């Protein structure tokens, strides 16, 4: 997804006036009244715009020593720009105040876009140190702008005079978002309240950065060790070799090590025959960062929750969720909880039914125990294989990574939108595993650059995401430079790079975000592309997953790497039929995480302050999960509190927003039905979706945007049917793949 997660919120607050659009703001640019000559500390890569095509970063010229001086110089430059807006003797106008503010921070956008990408995708100890040092400074810098009373007075003067002004709809939306964002930041608070907000923001930037680094270290720096090959029985020879190599790298030759991935469940568990080994791997994942080892994020969680609740109270809001959902498509925690709550009864029954079925399967296999989370996928996969005859290893033979991307993802984009892609090797990259493409529109004109970073590595945080190095805008005549980041385990040298079907869907998903960025058609960077509400931004990416199993697309890319044979129709049918199986776990763990997020952020100031020890953090999590009415001991949440990066990394992140994956899944399922009702994979459908949704950025009401596309409001029944939680009489078509597709969710 767009980097609105771990480090993104830190990036976002640099420009910080536009709510959900803030991540784009950091790529906003200066007013031009300050030049790089204002940087007096000597030459620095970030002083000037890149000379590479599309202003892509020149990684061959960037040194880690550039970042701190660049950040400091860039903040000083932007402060000068802001002061000139304030000191302008002319009466405040849209152009000399709102547009000038939008233009400020060009150098800061350049350095932030590169730095915070690397801290997520390819970090080092030094980058982490810089991150810890600069994040509170960026928070203070953002506050010096958003909480500046003299600047707000000019913004308010323009806003109050808006009825008498001649503006385009996008102008009006920029004015509204600028004003609302500053009010939401605290512009109308008392001096004392504003000072406290500044203190809270600075501390939040520090503790959330520490949380992000600790959660990553608990995953990347704490692999699970095994003493013998026998413990890893059932794994492929390649997986066992990789485990031996990792143990050797970790200084324990002769042993075997498995690196954790970001979610509670671990991908190797289903293949492991040794139950004790399965339990060991699962429990290491489940207990990471909870004090079981030397990493414990619970004190950080307690402090984050307390600071957020206190900040909400300063704004007169009962809790952080109520405060932060002001600009969402779903505008209150009550509405989000009502939406999710309607799924709980059927889901709880499904979990109990599936759990009993798995315990029966265990008995059939000679086991004398009830199913536990570390057993679930092993035995559900057995039942799935028997019921649908889907062999995951067999399926992977049809999904070779380069073909998935070029003959699948790109092919669908060509058929829907007329896009073409040219691989290039002349541009510097930050890691040798990164692929780069020029993207061309249907008329042959350049649209921008696409960077693809597919492989897992210790220097990369878990999950999958999308963001921009350069945002589209007519204000600066800039085309987008976009990247997708995945975490696919890299095949041993000399072996074909095959991927699971989950990663196939993830590749389509993340490129859906990329399309949202490439089709941006906005004047202002802070409204461009994926600069939309948290509970809308995942929608276009989820829709794009549907093409992964569309027959015409499959036939073009899903070919056996040995024989060249196209994936058989009957195997595809089995994959699709099996997609509704195991929803008690697959959907349940996501819903539980979303509800847990709301529980943490529905705390009042006093309630949050009372959770003041690590033990109380654990107790609150346990109680919150049990209150859900779901089978949480059978199906733990996708992320536990101690490594829930989405909601505790960054001052805002996806806090009170994890429900967005479910809300946008509802929009997605309704949209898939529309596509199928209207002929599927056609240029007419693609162009209509591009015109009504993908090109609109954050410039209009999301409900109106959806109705312009589908000519109706979305219907939740399509999602419930797809999950097997509602009557099959409403059908979203035979070409719909399973849930969810994004490994980073």
Image: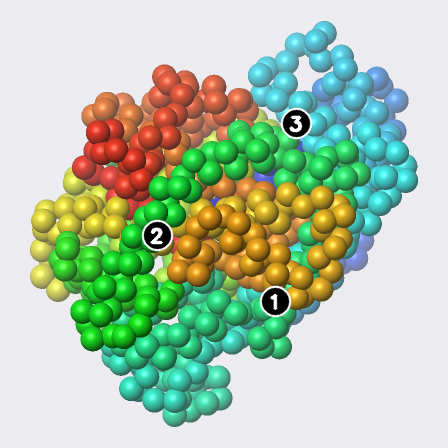
Marks 3, 1: nearer the viewer: 1
Q: Nearer the viewer, residue 125 or 712?
A: 712
Density class for disc 3 (Cα within 10 Å; few <14, some 14-19, many ≥20) is: many
- Residue 351 is tagged as 2
Residue 91 lies, in percent from the top left, at 84, 17
Residue 690 in the image: above or below residue 302: above
- Where is residue 736, by image quadrant? top left
Q: Is residue 588 left or right of residue 90?
A: left
User: In x, y percent, where is residue 591?
Assistant: 45, 47
Whether label 2 touches label 1, CB < 8 Å: no
User: Please, what secondary structure does the residue beneath circle 2 have?
Assistant: helix
Q: Is residue 207 left or right of residue 671?
A: right
Report how far apart the C-alphas of labels 2 and 3 lie in the structure.
43 Å
- At 37% across and 62% down in the image, what residue appears? 488
Q: Earlier in the sequence, mark 2 or mark 1?
A: 1
Residue 514 x/y as whole percent: 42, 42
Marks 2, 3: nearer the viewer: 2
Give percent across and percent down for residue 579. 25, 48
Q: Earlier in the sequence, mark 2 or mark 3?
A: 3
Residue on which the image places disc 3? 177
* Residue at mark 3 to residue at mark 1: CA–CA distance: 34 Å
Label 2 environment density (alpha carbons within 10 Å; few <14, some 14–19, many ≥20): many
Nearest the viewer among 659 and 352 is 352
* Residue at 38% across, 48% down: 348
Q: Which callout, 3 or 1, points at the residue further toward the start of the chain?
A: 3
Q: Which mark is residue 214?
A: 1
Residue 442, above or below 57: above
Residue 225's disc is none
Task: Work out whether residue 592 can be spotted.
Answer: yes
Q: Nearer the viewer, mark 2 or mark 1?
A: 2
Q: Is residue 421 visible?
A: no
């Amino acid at each position: 997804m767009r980097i609105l997660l771990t480090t993104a919120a830190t990036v976002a607050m640099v420009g910080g006036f536009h709510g959900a659009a803030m991540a784009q703001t950091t790529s906003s640019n200066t007013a031009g009244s300050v030049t790089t000559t204002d940087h007096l500390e000597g030459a620095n890569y970030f002083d000037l715009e890149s000379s590479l095509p599309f202003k892509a970063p020149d990684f061959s010229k960037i040194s880690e020593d550039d970042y701190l001086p660049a950040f400091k110089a860039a903040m000083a430059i932007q402060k000068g720009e802001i002061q000139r807006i304030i000191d302008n003797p002319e009466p405040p106008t849209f152009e000399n105040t709102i547009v000038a503010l939008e233009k400020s921070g060009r150098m800061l956008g350049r350095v932030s876009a590169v730095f915070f990408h690397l801290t997520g995708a390819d970090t080092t100890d030094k980058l982490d140190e810089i991150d810890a040092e600069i994040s509170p400074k960026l928070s203070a810098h953002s506050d010096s702008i958003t909480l500046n009373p003299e600047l707000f007075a000019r913004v308010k003067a323009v806003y109050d005079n808006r009825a008498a002004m001649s503006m385009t709809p996008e102008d009006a939306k920029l004015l509204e978002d600028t004003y609302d964002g500053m009010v939401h930041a605290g512009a109308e608070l008392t001096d004392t309240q504003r000072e406290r907000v500044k203190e809270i923001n600075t501390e939040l930037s520090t503790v959330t950065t520490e949380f992000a680094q600790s959660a990553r270290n608990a995953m990347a720096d704490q692999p699970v060790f095994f003493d013998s090959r026998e413990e890893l029985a059932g794994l492929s020879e390649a997986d066992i070799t990789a485990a031996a190599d990792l143990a050797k790298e970790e200084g324990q030759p002769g042993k075997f090590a498995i690196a954790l991935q970001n979610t509670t469940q671990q991908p190797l568990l289903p293949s492991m025959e040794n139950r004790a080994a399965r339990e060991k791997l699962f429990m290491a994942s489940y207990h990471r960062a909870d004090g079981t080892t030397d990493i414990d994020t619970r004190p950080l969680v307690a402090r984050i929750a307390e600071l957020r609740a206190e900040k909400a109270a300063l704004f007169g809001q009962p809790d952080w969720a109520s405060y932060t959902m002001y600009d969402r498509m779903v505008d209150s925690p009550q509405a989000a909880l009502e939406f999710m709550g309607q799924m709980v009864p059927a889901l709880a029954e499904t979990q109990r039914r599936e759990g009993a079925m798995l315990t029966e399967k265990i008995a059939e296999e000679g086991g004398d125990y009830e199913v536990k989370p570390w057993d679930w996928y092993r035995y559900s996969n057995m039942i799935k294989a028997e019921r649908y005859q889907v062999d995951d290893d067999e399926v992977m033979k049809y999904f070779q990574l380069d073909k998935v991307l070029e003959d699948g993802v790109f092919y669908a984009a060509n058929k829907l939108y007329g896009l073409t892609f040219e691989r290039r090797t002349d541009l510097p990259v930050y890691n040798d595993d990164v692929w780069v493409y020029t993207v061309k529109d249907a008329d042959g004109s350049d649209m921008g650059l696409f960077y693809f970073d597919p492989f897992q590595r210790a220097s990369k945080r878990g999950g999958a995401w999308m963001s921009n190095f350069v945002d589209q805008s007519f204000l600066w005549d800039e085309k987008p430079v976009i990247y997708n980041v995945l975490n696919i385990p890299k095949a041993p040298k000399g072996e074909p790079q095959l991927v699971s079907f989950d990663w196939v869907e993830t590749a389509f998903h993340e490129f859906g975000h990329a399309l949202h960025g490439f089709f941006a058609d906005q004047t202002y960077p802070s409204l461009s592309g994926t600069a939309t509400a948290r509970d809308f931004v995942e929608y276009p990416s989820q829709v794009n997953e549907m093409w992964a199993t569309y027959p015409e697309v499959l036939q073009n890319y899903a070919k056996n790497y040995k024989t060249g044979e196209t994936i058989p129709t009957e195997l595809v049918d089995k994959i699709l039929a099996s997609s509704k199986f195991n929803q008690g776990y697959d959907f349940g763990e996501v819903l539980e995480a979303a509800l847990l997020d709301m529980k943490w952020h529905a705390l009042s100031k006093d309630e949050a302050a009372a959770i003041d020890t690590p033990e109380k953090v654990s107790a609150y999590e346990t109680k919150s999960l049990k209150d859900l009415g779901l089978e949480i001991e059978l199906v733990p949440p996708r992320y536990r509190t101690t490594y829930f990066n989405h909601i505790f990394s960054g001052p805002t992140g996806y806090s009170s927003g994890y429900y967005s994956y479910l809300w946008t899944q509802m929009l997605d399922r309704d949209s898939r039905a529309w596509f199928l009702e209207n002929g599927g994979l056609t240029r007419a459908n693609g162009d209509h979706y591009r015109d009504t949704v993908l090109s609109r950025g954050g410039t209009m009401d999301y409900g109106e945007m959806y109705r312009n596309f589908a000519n109706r409001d979305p219907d939740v029944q399509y999602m419930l049917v797809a999950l097997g939680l509602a009557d099959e009489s409403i059908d979203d078509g035979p070409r719909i793949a399973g849930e969810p597709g994004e490994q980073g969710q």
